[in-house]
Image: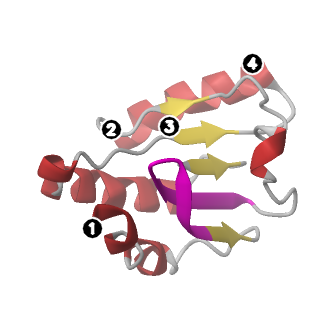
Amino acid sequence: MIFARKADDALAGLVKEIEKAIEANQDKKLAAFVNLIGEDRDQLEKAAEKFIKKYNITKVPIVVPVEYENGPRNFNINPEAEVTVMLYRRAKVKANHAFAPGQLAGKVQQVLADLPKILN
C-alpha cells in the first residue's frame, strides 16, 4: 500500500517496478494500490486519472481514500513524508518506508528488497 502526495515520475518508477513484481508473483497473489493524499479531493482524483493514462498503469489501482488529507488516522502517515510505502501480509506491516519530498527517486530498489518479507 502506497500513500503519495505527488503523482510524478518518481512515483511512476516505483509503481512500474511494482507492476513487474505483481506479474512475476501472480502465484503468490501479490497486489498493491496507491492512495493519493492531499488537500483537494477533486484535484487528487484528476491527478489519479492523468497519472494512470500518462504512465499506462494497468495492475496497480490509483485511488483517493475517504480520509484523503493524510490517509486514515490509525495509519499514522507522517505528514512530512511525500511517499509512504507499507508492505503488509495478513493485516500486519512487515516493512514501512517513508520518503521526504524528492527522496523516492533512487530508493525504489530499497523498497523492492523488502518484498520477500510479504511473499514468503
- Residue under label 1: 120
Q: CA distance from mark 2 to mark 4?
A: 21 Å
Q: Which quadrant would residue 32 be assigned to in this image?
A: top left
Q: Is residue 101 magenta?
A: no
Q: Earlier in the sequence, mark 3 or mark 2?
A: 3
> Taking 10 as reference, is 37 above or below it?
above
- Who comes first in sequence, dot 2 or dot 4? 4
The numbered mark at residue 42 is 4
Q: Taking 54 as reference, is 47 left or right?
A: right
Magenta range is 82-96
The answer to whether the residues at label 1 and label 4 have Cβ atoms under 8 Å apart is no
For badge 2, the amino acid type reads Asn
SS at badge 3: helix
**Image coordinates for residue 4, horizontal then vertical, percent:** 66, 49
Establish if 54 lies above or below 46: below
Q: Earlier in the sequence, mark 1 or mark 4?
A: 4
Identity, as a three-letter code, of the amino acid under mark 4: Asp
- Mark 3 touching mark 2, by CB under 8 A? no
Marks 1 and 3, Cα distance to the nearest angstrom? 31 Å
Mark drawn on residue 56: 2
Q: Amino acid at mark 1?
A: Asn
The residue at 60%/46% (across/down) is 7
Task: Give how far across and how far down residue 90 sits, in percent.
Answer: 45, 49
Which of the 4 image quarters holds residue 60?
top left
Residue 69: image location, x then y, percent: 84, 36
Residue under circle 3? 51
N-terminal label among 1 and 2: 2
Q: Tell me which amino acid carries mark 3.
A: Phe
Asked if the residues shown at circle 1 and circle 3 are in contact, with their CB atoms under 8 angstroms apart, the answer is: no
Instruction: Work out whether residue 68 can be spotted.
Output: yes
Q: Distance between the Cα atoms at labels 3 and 2?
A: 8 Å
Q: Is residue 70 in view?
A: no
